[in-house]
Amino acid sequence: MAYDYRSDAVLGHVLAYWEERRGSRRMPARRDLDPTDLAAVLPHLQLIDVVPPDRLRYRLVGTALVDTFGHDYTGRFVDELLLGTSRAELITRVFTTVRDTARPVFLQARYFTAKNVDFMTNRIYLPLSENEAEVNMMLAALSFDFGTHRPPHGVWASAQLDADQSGLEVIEPA
């Protein structure tokens, strides 16, 4: 059965907010978002800048992500962080899909760590545009399913992507 991201406490909240803020437009602009409206999920958010011609930079990384990933990558470019890894390929494909289609994307991926922890990441990437035509930023929300065992801080650093257990879905906005 497919994951119900609309019922996810983090993803569903952020997607509903994005849809409200875009109204009848294709996508909202960054200026349409108010961080105080997202206070409950702020630790699970990312803002990603689209830097022409073809780079992506993390503008904001929430504290829940820093805790899970084991480091703060705010201000860093994607291609600097994950160079040559299966994660880099997957994230680049996701970001490119959002940028090129100007549509939200849901991604679920399974990871295994060196400490024998496996977990799922549930992510939604939402396009933002200053001109309603080109994506210049993305709002992302991430939630994690660790089952009954919450791994120690920084587990992400040793995580390997299970390429057979990751799926990408372009979302038709409501």
Image (cartoon, rainbow, N blue to C red):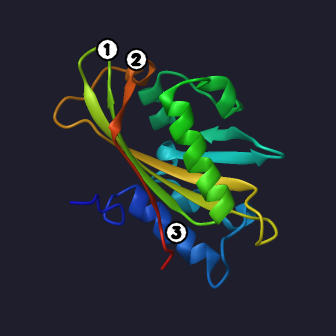
Query: Which one is in front in this view, the residue at disc 1 or the one at disc 3?
Result: 1
Dot placed on the residue nearer the N-terminal end, 3 or 2 = 3
148 relative position to 59: left or right: left
Inter-mark Cα distance, 1 to 3: 36 Å
| Residue type marked 1 | Ala
* 160 lies above or below 100: above
Residue at the spot of label 1: 114
Dot placed on the residue nearer the N-terminal end, 2 or 1 = 1
Residue at the spot of label 3: 17
Q: Nearer the viewer, residue 62 or 95?
A: 95
Q: Residue at horizontal 53%, vertical 47%?
A: 45
4 relative position to 100: left or right: left
Residue at the spot of label 2: 158
Inter-mark Cα distance, 2 to 1: 5 Å
Q: Residue furthest front?
A: 164
> Is residue 76 something one can see in this rendering?
yes
Q: Nearer the viewer, residue 34 or 142?
A: 142
Instruction: Kindly check if marks 3 and 2 are in contact, taking CB atoms under 8 A apart as contact.
Output: no
Task: Tell me the SS state at disc 3.
Answer: helix
